[in-house]
Each structure stands twice: as C-alpha cells, then as structure tokens.
Image: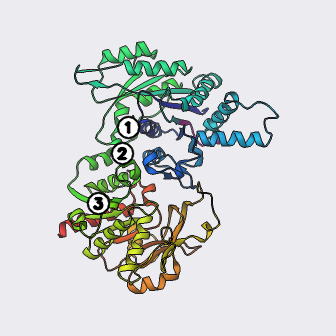
Amino acid sequence: MAVKYIFVTGGVASSLGKGIIAASLGKLLQARGFKVTIQKFDPYINIDPGTLNPYEHGECYVTEDGAETDLDLGHYERFLGMHTSKANNVTTGKVYNTVITKEREGAYLGKTVQIVPHITDEIKRRMLLLGESGEYDIVITEVGGTVGDMESQPFLESIRQLQWELPQDSVCVIHLTLVPYLAAAAELKTKPTQHSVQALQHAGVLPDIIVCRSEKELSEDLRHKMARFCNVKPGCVMQSIDASSIYQVPLNMLAEGLDVKALECLGIKDYPEAELSRLRTFLDRLFNPEHTVHVAVVGKYVELQDSYKSILESFVHAGAANLCKVKVHYVHSEFVDDSNVEEKLGCMDGILVAPGFGERGLEGKIVAIRYAREKGVPFFGICLGMQMAVVEFARDVLGFTDAASSEVSSTTTHPVIDLMESQKSTSVKGGTMRLGAYDCALEEGSLAAKVYGTLQISERHRHRYEFNNKYLAQFEAAGLKASGRNPRTGLVEVVELPEHPFFIATQFHPEYKSTPECPHPIFVSFVKASLDHQQNR
C-alpha cells in the first residue's frame, strides 16, 4: 500500500487538543493493524523548544535520540506506545535554518530564495520524509497554531500543494474547531467554525473531516448545518466532547467514526476491527480506584501544569496500576521554608521534587527533601530533584554547610554537583546538553534494581550538571548510595537511602517513557510506597 498522509489543523482558538485528536486517531488506526507515526510542525522560529522557558511553551519533551521537542510528542508516544525521533518535530526555525544554510552554500545556483517555492519545498520534504522511510502505512501531521495565524501560512500552503501533487486518495485533512456554548442564549454557536473553515479554504486547503470541540452534544441539525456551510460530506462533522481523561478520547472518536471516515477518505476499504482491550482495561482501572493518595509535586513552574505534563501523566498511569487515584498537590518551591514546610507537606503521602534549571526555588526544594528524609515520607527526585537531594545530604549529614551545585554557586568550597567535563567547552545553549537515552547499570540488591526488576536499564536525559564523583566515597560512607551508574563514564544516575522507607532520585527523566499500557516502574513503586505510608500512618 502506498503511504497515506493525514493532516490535522486547528481553528478558532489554540489549546483545543489537536495533539490529543491526532494521537487518538493514530491509536485507532494502529489498533486496526496499520503502521502509524505522528509528527508535529510548529510555527515558531526557535530551532526547538530546548531554550524556551516552560512558562512560554510548557514541557520540553526529549526523545530517545536526543531531540528536544514539543510536549505533544509525549502524547504521541504515550498513546501509540512507540518512540518518536528528531524527524517527528519540525519548526519554522529548522526549515529556515536549512534553507538559509543551503543558500549560503550556493545550492540554489543564484536563484532568488523565496517562501514559494523554496520554504514550501523544504516543508513538503520534511512532511513526506517519514513516509519515505518505508516503515509506515500512514503518517499523521499535526500543524501547530490556528488557521489565520501569519506564522502558519507556509505550512498551509505546503498542504495545499500536496493535496494537488500527491496521488488521489493519498491525503486527508482534519480540521479541529471550537463550537462554543453561550449560556445566556442556551445554545451552541457554529459561526466560529464556519469562519475557521472559510479561512482554511481561503488558504486553498479543503478539509475532509471537521472535529468540533464542545462541552455539549451536537445535534444532527447542527452537524448538517456545519456540513452544508463548510462544504464537507454528511457524516464528516464529528464532536469531541470534554472527557474526564484524555485516554477516553480514542474511544469517543471510535464512537464518532473518525478512523473509519479517515480511511474512507484515503480510499482504504479492508481493515480489521479495532483491538483496544488493553486501553479498555487501563480505563477501567483508572475510573474505578480503590484508594486515593496525596502526592506533593514541589517545583518552580507549578502555575502551568503543562510544565510537568509527562510527570502528571506518569502519575495517572501509575495510579491505575495501583488501583489508586493520585491527587497531585502543586507546591511552589520558591515559597517553602523551615517555617511552613510542615503546613505544606505534613499531610502528603509522598513528595516528588521536580526537574528545572536555575537558582530560583532551590532552597525550598532542599527544605522539602530534608523534610521527606527526616520524616520518612516517600521521596522521588528527578534531575534537579536528584541534584538537590545530594546537596541537602551534603549540608545536613556530611556537614558541608556551603555545599551547592556549581550551576548556582561559583564560590562554594564543596561543589557536590558540577558541570560535566564535556560541557565545559560548550558556549552554545541550544541542543548541547546531555540529551536522549543512555545506559545505566544498577547495583544488585538496591531499591532501584528491585523497582526495575533488572540490572541493566536505559533512560532519557536532559542536563549539563552531574554528581561530582570526587565526593562519592564520603556520601556512600554516610549512607547515600549511588545505586545506578553509567557503565562507560561512571556518571551517577541514581541515588537512594537504603535505611529510608522509600527514598530514590534519578539524574534521568523516567517520566518520558511511561505509557498507560506500560507505566514506568519507578512511578508505580513510588505510588505504592505512598499508599503504604498513608495506611501505616
């Protein structure tokens, strides 16, 4: 079968959930036996989100091959249970960087370089790249932003050209819009959707399917009205009602027939029934918990939930695995100190100290870690959370009162966290951290080995600073064990306190590899320890 392409665009408002719709469609097509991948095209000029503040763009998701990408790639991986790569996230910055570099090299033979055809040709090349690999039957492309945005116009023009250039039945366009409910009038309004589709058609792109986000059910009359005014076939206007869990959306879209209509649009007629038994089992466990645990996420970006999106989703997965609802409480580390730590954390069943960068909020993280260590509360630290666990132990157990990370203190006499040797000659910030999957060897008999059930693991990283091995002997003699290390470099990847009920911290980011059908073992064990702590209290 020739490769088929599905494009997902959005209109009316941002944050409608194009990524969830794309991932849900991918899940349904995968469940029908098709080999599917999803890619995201973002209109911003940054090369990638690696240098963006989380408040600007939410979490920066990291792939196995070390790409810093949009957080929607996390949804793709969690829904499809497969790895994405650098090729799955393209930005305007990447496109322009490639074109300008080629122009400097003389690749255009003196031609005037223009948006059409040079920029659009590069966009199209990247849109088709994964399809040309021979690995997939269907490639889904989500286009960031909303129709009408100046930044999105080259992407829409590229889709227009592909609709014309590719063979018949090779392209399907799905447009996601908002159908708002006006309480004062007690009715749903379709005019925003009509205008959004008109803007898309004005760009030359003709949608095949319209998916409408709404908080109310769409009547058949409303669906026929939108089909008539938006120039799509009857039955191709579908609703996406607000769901209690994003993992319910694939089943909602299955009921709407989204995958069937997409396959019909692509000229595919023979396919099996969707096999979704594992997803249904997960949802059954998710919606029928037997317990509730309260976990504090101590971080510096807690005002924006998307800053810790993968962590929050990992708690959903781990909670279902334990038949337990995980109630996450955000604690801003900048406002935690010795005077209020009991008030903020005293009723928590577990404490997770989140990743981050920079000095702001570090002392609050250290106070929270000390509280967990001394009170016997289950503790889990990730990346900067591990680094601050090391600093706290150095100060309060080893007696190194000025211990710190050299990231924030150049004058400390005990840099227990220090810049990696390979980073000392690097001045460029974008894409230069220790990124992607690296091996880790776990110590036999350790908590980490018990959690994973193996001694050899591979996890994803995103950091420049590391545990300073000059202090390793002193830490281990005092009780903080390095239970996971990189077999090639000796980099400490995991630390733990064997005498503590549950105290583990990792330099890597385990949240990037958790999925509903394969929850990450550290999160599962942490939630279980939190439940045990609650019951023991």
Of residues 519 and 120, the one drawn nearer to the viewer in this rendering = 120
Residue wearing tag 3 = 296
Whichever of callouts 2 and 1 sits on the residue coming sooner in the sequence is 1
Looking at the rendered structure, the secondary structure element under dot 1 is: helix
Residue 453 visible, this angle: no
The residue sitting at 48% across, 82% down in the picture is 472
Of residues 74 and 354, the one drawn nearer to the viewer in this rendering = 354
* Crowd around label 1: few <14 · some 14–19 · many ≥20 (10 Å): many
Q: Amino acid at mark 3?
A: Ala
* Crowd around label 2: few <14 · some 14–19 · many ≥20 (10 Å): some
**At which x and y percent is residue 259?**
44, 31
**At which x and y percent is residue 134?**
63, 41
Q: Is residue 386 left or right of residue 287?
A: right
Position of the C terminus, as image quadrant, is: bottom left
- Label of residue 186 in the image: none
- Label of residue 250 in the image: 1
Which image quadrant for residue 488? bottom right
Residue 504 visible, this angle: yes
Looking at the rendered structure, the secondary structure element under dot 2 is: helix
Foreground: disc 3 or disc 2: 3
Between the C-alphas of marks 3 and 2, the distance is 28 Å
> Is 134 within the magenta?
yes
Which residue range is magenta in the image?
133-140
Residue wearing tag 2 = 279
Q: Are marks 2 and 1 in contact (CB under 8 Å)?
A: yes
Foreground: disc 1 or disc 3: 3
**At which x and y percent is residue 117?**
69, 28
Q: Is residue 222 left or right of residue 135?
A: left
Position above or below: 393 against 506: below
Looking at the rendered structure, the secondary structure element under dot 3 is: strand
Between the C-alphas of marks 1 and 3, the distance is 30 Å
